[in-house]
Image (cartoon, rainbow, N blue to C red):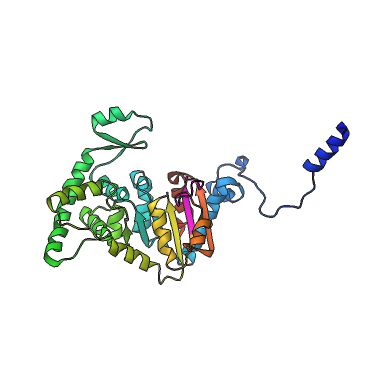
Amino acid sequence: MSKTDKAKIARKNILRKSEEAEGKTICGYDFNKGVDYEKIFDSFATMGIQASNFAKAVEIINEMIKEKAFIYLGYTSNMVTSGVRETIRYLTECKKVNVLVTTAGGIEEDIIKCIGNFKLGDFRTPGKALREKGINRAGNVFIPNSRYCDFEDFIIPIFEEFYARQKEKGKVLTPSELIWKLGEKINNEDSVYFWANKNKIPVYCPAITDGSLGDMVYFFKSSHPDFLIDVTQDIWSLNNTTLGPEKTGVIILGEGIIKHHICNANMFRNGANYAVYINTAPEYDGSDTGALPEEAVSWGKIATDAKSVKIYAEASLVFPLIVARSFAKW
């Protein structure tokens, strides 16, 4: 075959004619027009990559709100460790969401921050140096260990109160009941759970013992062996919240148990109508952590006709901006 023939074949394969693609034209913001943050965010819709997923998430959440969907907000503990806590507190204070689901750290660190603040540190600070000073590091957030000592002083009397009730009336404490009581006792408007208690927004924590709360349960149960916390009542209660609303929407910051707990509850109603995931996890390992919304559709956790999106991003970067473009405007 001659060089000319080879070139003809290559040209035919590479420069083949195509149909025109449908959709919006890709275009970003023109900074020659100055800095207009509203228009910058508007431009995300046509920017492509994760910016357009951001715009789609805003659109979906605004539809959730407009359609009066029953909204579940799930978040991992690092959201409360960080300043995303204040965004979650706003949503709870202003009754923008209907149910919260988090991990033990997402409960205890909200309360602990009311007792003493956390400090901005560095991701690369050696653990040995911090350990010698009694400072715990969560990413680039520094938490003096004395905060947990103060937390023990705060929570043990609450355990004593519930234990006395258990002995007298046989009524066993549930995680959601404990969380509301923590919010009531801390009596601090900076607290997410102060507002959850005040506004009667249920908070579920399926991994209640996976954190300092678990440590406190361990210490308390060591001297009160018959002390109990009933997780079965909470799973019954959470699943029942999905049965009744005309539409439900889920917003999940992070992965793991909080993601699955919310999605699994919505399976009881044949799937949520709206879903927004924000996390950095890939799906190649087959875990639910990185699974796309489409996988949840196969289980009936998200409805087959639902509007959904996953933003591959670290939530502290994008969630406050999403709230600014959605909840804060209603």
Classify residue 23 by image quadrant.
bottom right
User: Most extreme residue toward the front, as rendered?
Assistant: 1
Q: Is residue 284 magenta?
A: yes
* Front one among 7 and 161: 7
Residue 281: x %, y % from top left: 47, 45
Tell me residue 188's x, y (percent): 25, 52
Per the picture, the main secondary structure of the magenta-coloured stretch is: loop
Q: Residue at x 32, y 59 (%)?
A: 203
* Magenta residues, start to end: 275-289
Q: Quadrant of the C terminus?
A: bottom left
Q: Position of residue 240 (x, y in %)?
A: 36, 68
Is residue 39 a member of the stretch shown in magenta? no
Which residue does the image show at 40% across and 70% down from the upper left? 243
Q: Nearer the viewer, residue 63 or 236?
A: 236
- From the viewer's perspective, is 216 left or right of 285? left
Is residue 70 in view from this perspective? no
Instruction: Say whether residue 209 is left or right of residue 325.
Output: left
Q: Is residue 109 or residue 299 the one in the foreground?
A: 299
